Image: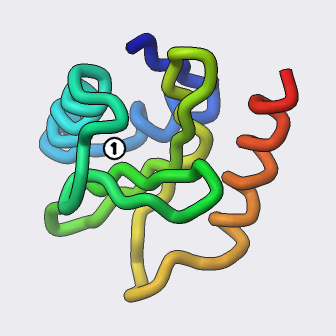
Amino acid sequence: MEIIYPQKIKKFFGALDNMLADRMARSIDLLERYGNLLEMPMSKPLGKGLFELRVMGNNHIRIFYCFHKNRIYLLHAIVKKNRRIPKQDIGLARGLMKRIVSI
């Protein structure tokens, strides 16, 4: 499956240290290879077509993504600092997903 990276996600990747960027690249490669067959602990469904790619390490990264027309759209990425993902980040990802799905 083809992965679509918006410029915002590319900037986020560029700001990470090399070790974390390598982990994230491996996780994205797995997502590209296995698509919707990727499961926990690497990927977690958040409901209504939204998923999170989970990159573990000293700093946990969450990349929100969705599937549409045989493509994977990376929507939003955060460094997870708390136990729960902030609702505003999930809301932002859902809003971006709605724009893509309506195309």
In the visual, does 18 lie left or right of 76? left
Q: Residue furthest bottom?
A: 83
Along the horizontal axis of the image, is 57 left or right of 77?
A: left
**Label 1 is placed on what type of residue?**
Leu
Residue at horizontal 59%, vertical 49%? Answer: 49
Q: Quadrant of residue 80?
A: bottom left
Quadrant of the drawing holding the N terminus: top left
Above or below, 70 against 99 in this view is above
| Residue under numbered circle 1 | 16
| Percent of width and height locating residue 4 | 54, 19
Residue at coordinates 41% horizontally, 40% vertically from top-left?
15
Residue 8: x and y in percent read 63, 33
Q: Is residue 101 above or below residue 38?
A: above
**Residue positioned most to the top:** 2
Q: Quadrant of residue 29?
A: top left
The answer to which quarter of the image holds residue 103 is top right
What is the crowding at mark 1: few (fewer than 14 residues within 10 Å), some, or many (at least 20)?
Answer: few
Identify which residue is drawn at 61% across, 17% down: 69
Q: Nearer the viewer, residue 29 or 25?
A: 29
Image height check: is 64 above or below 24?
below
SS at mark 1 in the image: loop
